[in-house]
Image (cartoon, rainbow, N blue to C red):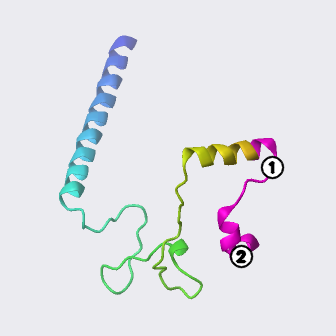
């Protein structure tokens, strides 16, 4: 008797999983065909000006204006320089900073 119940429960769960898979594939295909469509999932807030969405608070400055500059600037260094800096950190010595001499403002940070 328990075998029949297990088989029926497994069949129901399998059908639900397949239905969920098909639904997700259809939604994914629709999003791939129309990438400019507004996203309604994830709690997207809409303003009164139509389709304009509210930007994330971290992308705003103190006055509430959208920041139009890069938020992160990365400097590429060679493997040798990276190894020297890691060795200096491991040994407890201060690594030589090339930008500290050029930019006095970075030393204050």
Say which element carries label 1. loop
Residue sitting at 29 percent across and 41 percent down?
20
Residue sitting at 45 percent across and 75 percent down?
55
The answer to which of marks 2 and 1 sits earlier in the sequence is: 1
Can residue 1 be seen? no
Residue sitting at 30 percent across and 79 percent down?
51
Q: Main secondary structure of the magenta part?
A: helix
Kindly indicate the quadrant of the structure image that contains residue 87.
Answer: top right
Image: 15 above or below 82 = above
Q: Where does the image place residue 7, in percent across and percent down from the top left?
A: 32, 18
| Quadrant of the snapshot with the N terminus | top left
- The range drawn in magenta is 89-109
Identify which residue, 32 or 106, lies in the foreground.
106
Image: 6 above or below 90 = above
Is 109 positioned to the left or the right of 43 in the image? right
Q: Where does the image place residue 31, in percent across and percent down from the top left?
A: 24, 57
Are circles 2 and 1 on residues that touch, CB within 8 Å? no
Identify which residue, 67 or 81, lies in the foreground.
81
Image: 7 above or below 35 = above
Look at the image and say whether residue 42 sits in the magenta stretch. Answer: no
| Quadrant of the snapshot with the C terminus | bottom right
Look at the image and say whether residue 99 sits in the magenta stretch. Answer: yes
Kindly indicate the quadrant of the structure image that contains residue 14.
Answer: top left
Q: Where does the image place residue 4, in percent across and percent down from the top left?
A: 32, 15
Q: Which residue is mark 1?
A: 93
* Crowding at mark 2 (Cα within 10 Å: few <14, some 14-19, many 20+): few
Q: Where does the image place residue 62, in percent across and percent down from the top left?
A: 60, 84
Can residue 79 be seen? yes
Q: Which residue is mark 2?
A: 104
């Amino acid at each position: 008797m328990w075998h029949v119940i297990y088989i029926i429960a497994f069949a129901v769960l399998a059908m639900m999983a397949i239905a969920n898979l098909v639904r997700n594939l259809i939604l994914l295909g629709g999003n791939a065909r129309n990438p400019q469509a507004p996203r309604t999932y994830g709690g997207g807030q809409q303003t009164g000006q139509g389709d304009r969405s509210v930007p994330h608070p971290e992308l705003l400055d103190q006055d509430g204006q959208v920041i139009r500059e890069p938020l992160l600037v990365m400097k590429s260094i060679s493997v040798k320089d990276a190894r020297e800096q890691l060795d200096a950190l491991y040994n407890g010595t201060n690594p030589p900073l090339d930008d500290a001499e050029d930019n006095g403002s970075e030393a204050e940070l």
